[in-house]
Structures are given as structure tokens and as C-alpha cells.
Amino acid sequence: KLQTEEVEVFSTPSYACQRRTTLDNHNAVLTDALSLLAENAELSGEDGRGVAFRRAAAALKALPLPVTRLTQLGGVPCLGGHSLRVIKDVLESGASPEVEALRRSERFKALKVLTGIFGVGVKTAGRWIGEGILTLRQLRDSGPTLNRAQRAGLRHYDDLNRPVGRAEAAAVAAVVEAAAGSVLPGARVTLIGGFRRGKQTGHDVDFLITHPEEGREAGLMPKLVSWLDSQGFLLYQKTNSNSYLEAAEGPARPASNMDRFERCFSVFKLPEEAGRGGAGAGGEGGPRPWRAVRVDLVVSPVSQFAFALLGWTGSKLFERELRRWAGHEMNMCLSSHALYDHRQSRYLRASSEEEIFAHLGLEYIPPSERNA
Ligand code: 8DG
Ligand code: MN
Ligand code: MN
């Protein structure tokens, strides 16, 4: 080249929890390619490779401008040889042959369709593909035994694969607030997950519920679920009671008994109001009066609320990086229940997310900047 141009060289810290990642992604073409490779690795049971591609994508999401040349990436962490090759291909020719081939691959398409059924994981989908089941039609025709979650997932496939909008999330929130207020006056409902990070759509709606008086939240989930069911809001639910208990010796010891932190995976039957969509999956004869929406509910005691809030707001990679930072850089163990300091052999208390970041020696990152 005869001319010399000034090209910005990017640099960014190595852990996603040290970076501010908004939804304003300047490198979506690159991160979409890397995310697809991550997804394929995860769908193939190669979690390590999946994380590597997720980290690479996340590093690019944090950059302030579009990347135009490979030489700008000298100070960007987490880019392995494979990721760099994909980035190079996309920068030079607009697409990566590997990613394009993957998009067209029958196996990848089948894994996407089958794991798109609520209740179907990577292993089940892989087994079905091995039996020649590649489509929903083949699944319905060949009739392998489905569990309750999978039957609900198949029945509501179209609804559950249609993104949930903010207005729908707000409508679900109103229902959950009514339920919580009715079975436990004073209960507090907080929107978590992607919507708390400012996303406009999500694959589900996530809520964290607590009560300002410690202990009053115990046994809340079954009551909540039975209220929702009696009002006709539930198409499916599965409640897991969580048996978290702090051990004096620290978190290495297995927790036991005491059901105080509960979770419910559910499918809501959400009435469609005029003006809030409804035109979606109709098909046979006008708008339907309701749609199915995936809803996750978590109940936490108020003493663990800040940890639960931080742990369930996401993104998944941001959470993973927080725990990795805590372990590798601070000799601490972070969970959605607590933070344990191995050097001091004690739990560190916190009543806000800000305090947890401070314990971890990290600058506070608000939810809208955790979109790694
Ligand atoms: P989306 O629904 O908008 O697509 O995205 P999201 O809201 O970010 O993802 P999500 O799958 O609904 O997960 C929300 C958060 O919950 C995310 O940070 C990961 C976290 N989470 C699970 N399962 C579990 C779990 O079993 N334990 C803990 N502690 N956190 C979990 O999804
Ligand atoms: Mn979610
Ligand atoms: Mn969820």
C-alpha cells in the first residue's frame, strides 16, 4: 500500500464484567457469525468451544466502532485463531464460508428446530436426529415418547418461538404482581433477565420475587402457582424447590435441606389485548384471544436478594465472567445466593448489586451495560 491511513487500534479489558456492553453493537455482522459458531458448538455438546466463541463475540460487542481491519484487534482479548480466521473472512469478503455452510447444514437446522421445542435439550435432539427425525412433522409422525414439558412445547411451538415484546412482558408482570399481592401481601416482584437489561424482546419473561421481612417468602411459590393456575393463567408449570443453605465451612460443602429458594419454569396463557399485537400466529380465522409465553419465576429471601438479582439479570456470559473473575482474580466464590471470601473464610454480605461489585473490586456496571 502506498498511502498510510490512520486506523484506530482497539483495546478492552479481558473479563466481560470489566466492560460496559450496551445493546448498541457496532460489530453485529462479526458477532452474529461468532455467535452462530458458539450456538453450533453448544448444540453439539462442545461447551468449551461454545464459551470461547461467546467470549470472542462479547469482546467485539464492547468496541465503540465497527472493526474494518484485522490489525485493529491487537488489544482485543479472547480472540483465538479460529475466531480471527472467521473475522478475517467476514472483513475481507463479507461472509465466512464456514458460517454460511453451517447455516445451510441439515444437522444444524434440525438441531435448531428440535431444541426450539421447550423441554428438548441437546441430548434428546441429537438422539432424535440419529433416528432420522429432522423436522417437527417427522417428530409428530414418528411419535417418540414425549414428557409433559415437551408435549406443551410442541403444542405451543409457534407461540414459544415468537419473540415476547416489552408490552407483553408488562402484561405478564401485571398478572404476576396480582398473584403475588394476593397470596402474600407486601411481596415484591422484580423484572429480571433480558428485559431488565433493556432488551426490546426476549424468549421468555423472568421475575424475581421476595418479601421485605426475611422468612415470609418461604413456601410462596406453591401458593403463587396455585393462584395462577386457578385463574387460568398456566398452560404448564414445573416448580423446583431449591435447597440452599450456607455452610459455616463455606460453599465447598454441599448445601442441604431448607427449601428457601425456589424456581418455576412455566408457560403462561396470556390474554391478547386489542392493540397489543394479536396479529401474530393466528392463521385460522382472525386474531386469537391469547398466546403462550414462557415465564420464569424465582423466589429469594430478602437477605439473598441482591445476589439473586445480580445472578438472574444476565447476560449468561456476563454471569459466567463474574464468577470467573471472583474465583480467579479474587479467590472468592460467587453464586446467586452469596459471595464467599476464601482468604477471610467468611461470607460477604450485600444488600445491593453495587455492594457486590465493590466486594469484587469491580467498577459498578448497570444492567443496561451487561449485554455481553
Ligand atoms: P432472553 O430470555 O431475552 O432470550 O435472554 P435472557 O433473559 O438473558 O436469558 P434467560 O435464559 O431467560 O436467563 C436469564 C438469566 O437467568 C441469565 O442470566 C441466566 C440465568 N439463569 C438461568 N438458569 C439459571 C439457573 O439455573 N441458576 C441461576 N443462578 N441462574 C440461571 O437461565
Ligand atoms: Mn429471559
Ligand atoms: Mn429465563
Image: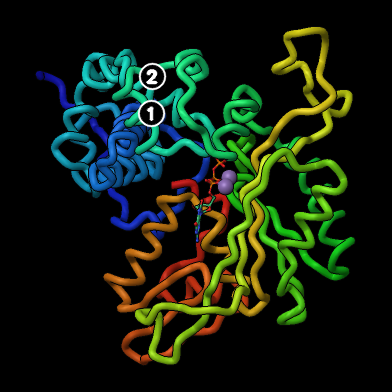
The numbered disc on residue 354 is none
Dot 1 surroundings within 10 Å: few (below 14), some, or many (20 or more)?
Answer: few
Residue 322: name its quadrant: bottom left
Residue type, numbered disc 2: Ile
Q: Is residue 82 visible?
A: yes
From the viewer's perspective, is the residue at label 1 or at label 2 nearer?
Answer: 2
Residue type, numbered disc 1: Asp
Q: Is residue 10 visible?
A: no
- Which residue is at the front of the view, 154 or 216? 154
Residue at numbered disc 1: 32
Q: Of the residues under marks 1 and 2, which one precedes in the sequence?
A: 1
Residue at numbered disc 2: 133
At numbered mark 2, what does the secondary structure look like: helix, strand or loop?
loop
Asked whether the residues under the numbered discs 1 and 2 touch, taking CB atoms below 8 Å apart as contact, a structural biologist would say no
- Which residue is at the front of the view, 201 or 144? 144
Q: Position of residue 48 (x, y in %)?
A: 24, 47
> Is 222 located above or below residue 142 in the figure?
below
Residue sitting at x 54%, y 38%: 147
Residue sitting at x 69%, y 33%: 165
- Which residue is at the front of the view, 176 or 197? 176
Residue sitting at x 79%, y 35%: 270
Q: Position of residue 39 (x, y in %)?
A: 35, 34
Quarter of the image where ligand 2 sits: top right
Residue sitting at x 76%, y 8%: 284
Q: Which quadrant of the figure contains the N terminus?
A: top left
What's the distance in space between the residues labelled 1 and 2, CA to CA? 27 Å
Residue at mark 1: C-beta within 8 A of ligand 1: no
Which residue in the rendered view is the most extreme toward the left? 1
Q: Position of residue 50 (x, y in %)?
A: 29, 42
Dot 2 surroundings within 10 Å: few (below 14), some, or many (20 or more)?
Answer: many
